[in-house]
Amino acid sequence: MKHQLYIFLFCLSWAIPTKAQQKDTVATFTLNQAISYAQKHQTSILNAEIDEQIAKNTVKQTIGIGLPQLSANADFNDFLKMPTSIFPDFISPLVYKAFTDNNVKDGNGNPITMPPGLGGSTPVQFGTKFTSSASLQLTQLLFDGSYLVGLQASKTYKELSVKNTKRTKIETTVAVTKAYYSVLVSKEQLALIDANIDRLKKTLNDTEQLFKNGFAEKIDVDRLTVLNNNLVTERENVIRLLALNVNLLKFQMGMTIGSTLSLTDQITTINVDSTPILNDGQAYNRRIEYSLLQTQQKLNELDVKRYKSLFLPTLAAFGNTSANFQDNKFSNLYDKSFPSTVIGLKLSLPIYAGGQKTYQLRNAKLEALKTQNNLINLQNSIDLEVSQAQTTYLNGQKSLENQQRNMDLAKEVLRVTKIKYEQGVGSSLEVTTAETSLKEAQNNYISALYDMLINKVNLDKALGNINY
């Protein structure tokens, strides 16, 4: 028992550190790796792939309708009370009529007459107490127009599920990309704030020394202290926002929120095309939404064909073989069987059903017409979306370039202002104003950078360039 306890404690001592080490493992991803991870773990994609498998099974299920159908049946009956049938007495009246027609006399020489009540009905019991049977039935559909159309529709339904999976993957790619960019922008914003805090702390320390030596006023120190406190508070807010964006990225990737995630891409490595992206007018042909609606149109057209096929006859072949057993004693029930076999054809021809099929066909044609109108509307909507996304993207490019210049200019203004202040030809208010202007320029730059990245994703999506 002691040896077993020692072995258990030894294994436990190795298992606990290993588990802790696994918990602290950091998952590192580039943008493409994050997208690939999401394609395998995002719940919406997993469900879409399950729907795709369901569609495949539905196709096989539909095919099975046209295959031979074989069934077996067996039964056993014990008649506790035998069923009774009422039979009319039609023989006695015929006999007495024959006597009458032939002038047959009774023993006294009188004509024979039919007694009253003769010729009524008599209760009769037929059958045996125990009966049993076993049978096999085979049916084969030879022709059914609705089945043939349904077979085509099931394959189109499978195609629809595949395209829906693709749409889900594209939407996941867009969501992961935007979340990834949000984290990178937050990290860039945090880096700018840290640089501002380091620079401001140096200025604050220098000003405090000048104040101690009587070369600066206390208000100069106070102004810089306020700026420093604001930057520290803003840094804490950005850190919380960064953590929130990281959790959002985990969610979009299908990771657990408790996982540790690290990004390898940097904001400076993202390639943003500065050349104008022109719309060739064919973006809707690359959009999965348009392709899905086209598939829906095919389903509507097949629906029209299905309702037309309901006016056609159906033909099926069948065969049945059975063995019947009967006896008044249960012990002798299965001693002898009475076999029966039959084959045949069954033709069903619809003649009139109150006009239901006619109106069903009309509604199916109207649904197909609606889908055609939706295709035209979606084409116009995609062209409009591309135009808007392109305009927003180009405006974002100009805005980002302008905010970059403003931030560089604000840095230069702050540098010159600090030199003037240190040389005694400038005021601390100018330094404070320059610090505030730089922080505002940096915030504007971060906002423009984020908008630029998101606008690029939206434009790629509008043009149908995001495929997975």
Image (cartoon, helix red, strand yellow):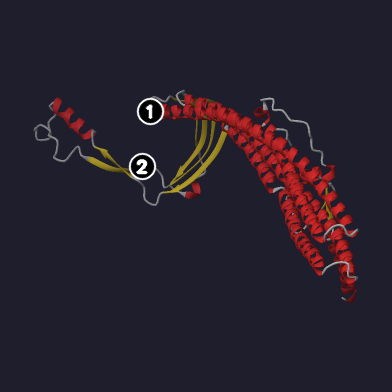
Q: Earlier in the sequence, mark 2 or mark 1?
A: 2
Q: Residues within 10 Å of mark 1 (few under 14, many from 20)?
A: few
From mark 2 to mark 1, how far is it between C-alphas? 47 Å
State the image coordinates of residue 450 (x, y, percent, origin top left): 74, 46
State the image coordinates of residue 352 (x, y, percent, origin top left): 37, 26
Pointers 2 and 1 in contact (C-beta within 8 Å):
no
The residue located at (62%, 32%) in the rendering is: 384
For mark 1, give the secondary structure.
loop
Report whether residue 260 is seen: no
2 vs 1, front mark: 1
For mark 2, give the secondary structure.
loop
Vertical order, 140 against 214 (above or below): above
The residue located at (14%, 39%) in the rendering is: 115
Q: Quadrant of residue 131?
A: top left
Q: Pick the quarter of the image with the N terminus.
A: bottom right
Residue pointed to by mark 1: 355
Q: Quadrant of residue 59?
A: top right
Q: Is residue 119 left or right of residue 322?
A: left
Vertical order, 126 against 210 (above or below): above
Residue pointed to by mark 2: 126
Residue type at mark 2 is Phe
Residue type at mark 1 is Gly
Q: Quadrant of residue 167?
A: top right
Q: Is residue 89 left or right of residue 383?
A: left
